Amino acid sequence: MITGLAIAQTLLVGLPASATAEKDTLTYSQLLEQIDKGQVSKVELDPANQIARVTMVGQDQNVPPKEVKLFDQNPELISRLNNSQNIEYEINPTADRSAAVGLMTNLLVLFLLLGIVIVILRRSANASGQAMSFGKSRARFQMEAKTGITFQDVAGIEEAKEELQEVVTFLKQPEKFTAIGAKIPKGVLLIGPPGTGKTLLAKAIAGEAGVPFFSISGSEFVEMFVGVGASRVRDLFKKAKENAPCLIFIDEIDAVGRQRGAGIGGGNDEREQTLNQLLTEMDGFEGNTGIIVIAATNRPDVLDSALLRPGRFDRQVTVDYPDLNGRLEILEVHSRNKKVASDVSLEGIARRTPGFTGADLANVLNEAAIFTARRRKEAITALEVNDAIDRVVAGMEGTPLVDSKAKRLIAYHEIGHAVVGTFCPGHDPVEKVTLIPRGQAKGLTWFTPDEDQGLVSRSQLLARITGLLGGRVAEEVIFGESEVTTGAGNDLEKITGLARRMVTRFGMSELGLVALEGESEPIFLGNEMVNRRSEYSEEIAASIDGQVRAIVGHCCQKAYEILQDNRILVDKLVDLLIEEETIEGDRFRQIIADYQKQTQQLVTPA
Ligand code: ADP
Ligand code: MG
Ligand code: ZN
């Protein structure tokens, strides 16, 4: 723009400059005089510029002719020239330079303005985000030519792997299936909680089959403008078809694939359009074009049923939390590239971590590696692994309190949990008790959870409630009713929840074998937006409360008895805990065993 302006300026300025640069000029009357005197040898007329160029007799060839301004009509001059024999005269209309230059400048100014307008438009387009690229979807999906991930990198979810092994064969050797007239499935839906390895699994399929991996997240379809999502879907499938055989992975498909027409105030138009486009695209290609669509979700219940019809995501593979063996395998996969000391038992870690997903386990080993580096050790030891698990489960470690009444109260609370838990048959064993705060907790008692948590017995549930009550009851027994603290709030919430479920769902109370409530889930707008109202009378509601109270009261009584009967043990453990801040499970059990031996000797006379 700046150079353009400069050029225009020189042109504009240069035009009059070159026009006035003529050296000698004559007036019209002077010219007539000179002609009469016979001094003129040649006259060129330039009617367009109304100029006559006059060459004098004997004038040097190099001296340019004199210019004379003419009028519209110049009869005197013409008649003189016609009469004179000595004067050469011609009419020489030079190309109309000034007109041409004028046109040029006009054009230039026009271009200049146009340029400025374009620049302004661009600016405003950038400022308002995608406003100008409306409808033109920028590719938002990622493509990986080679994922480099194989089934060996995925562990602990054997069933899912087996199911998907077939998909690899579909991609690799489709003729195997088409030869016998089998239709290759188009879509597979991976269902499972976050972090269980769904994305990893999809990448492994692409890696095993050696095909490109296209991925997009469901939420990326949904944009500010209506129609963008649908055009993204089109783009994605177009690109995929160009690269077939390949695998398309749609993460969080529930973001687009939620049931149509659900939600407050009717469905979201944009989402519906996107979903319709997706369905159209999936119907549009034949199974043997070598494209397989894998989608992942943790909310299969909210998906539109049209997505799950044959020819779409008709295969569903569940990717669940890994069991003990699965966790061990995952830990093996992730410890492959880490230096782990021989004192670390991966099986021990797997035992301590029920309910952990693959992502959690990977995180534990990574945290352990970070601790190791920070402590300048050669290899990860058991200590770092334990710290890493604690950190992943309960958050950052805080600084321990200084010895004070508050610390003593927390110690009694935690030892209360640990002792009551240990004395209740069916309770999980103590893993450790600590006064080192973590996250929100001022002190913690860890129990090693039982592996098979599938079925829990009534006595186990009661033991759990009693153990949870142990903390609060200890505060009360030692410090008196007026000194109890807010520290038990979290415990009480869990206690009430457990007791209530015993009554309303598991038929473990005097109300008998009835399920009064379903699984209480957060109410989700996608599927069912009616508030789940309890379907029992107020009378029943009152008796549920009564039963819950009865259960908790019974457990509370038991916790009291245990703590009062073992006061000496409790005091001893609290002193130890305050001194050492952490008591490991084995040591804890040893102390209890010693104590029981002593009391037995006291009670039973030799
Ligand atoms: P999802 O997609 O189910 O939320 P990801 O596949 O993104 O979970 O998993 C996140 C990370 O956790 C993976 O990159 C991997 O390192 C680890 N991971 C999860 N599951 C497994 C598994 N089964 N085997 C090995 N690593 C796993
Ligand atoms: Mg994922
Ligand atoms: Zn507690």
Image (tube, helix red, strand yellow):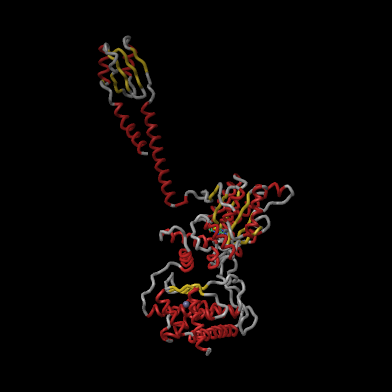
User: Which quadrant would residue 46 be assigned to in this image?
Assistant: top left
Residue 75 is situated, as x and y percent measured from the top left of the image, at 33, 19
Count every numbered label the image shows and give the total. Answer: 0
488 to 184, vertically: above or below: below
Ligand 1 is found in the corner quadrant, namely bottom right
Q: Position of residue 496 (x, y in %)?
A: 53, 79
State the residue in front, 459 or 325. Answer: 325
User: Residue most toward the right?
Assistant: 180
Residue in the image at 39% along x and 35% along y: 108
Q: Nearer the viewer, residue 42 or 147?
A: 147
The quarter of the image holding the N terminus is top left
- How far across and how far down the image is residue 152, in percent? 58, 54
Residue with the most extreme top position? 85
Q: Position of residue 362 (x, y in %)?
A: 51, 60
Q: Is residue 394 left or right of residue 509?
A: left
- In percent of the image, x 33 and y 33: which residue is there? 12
Do we see residue 373 in this rendering?
Answer: yes
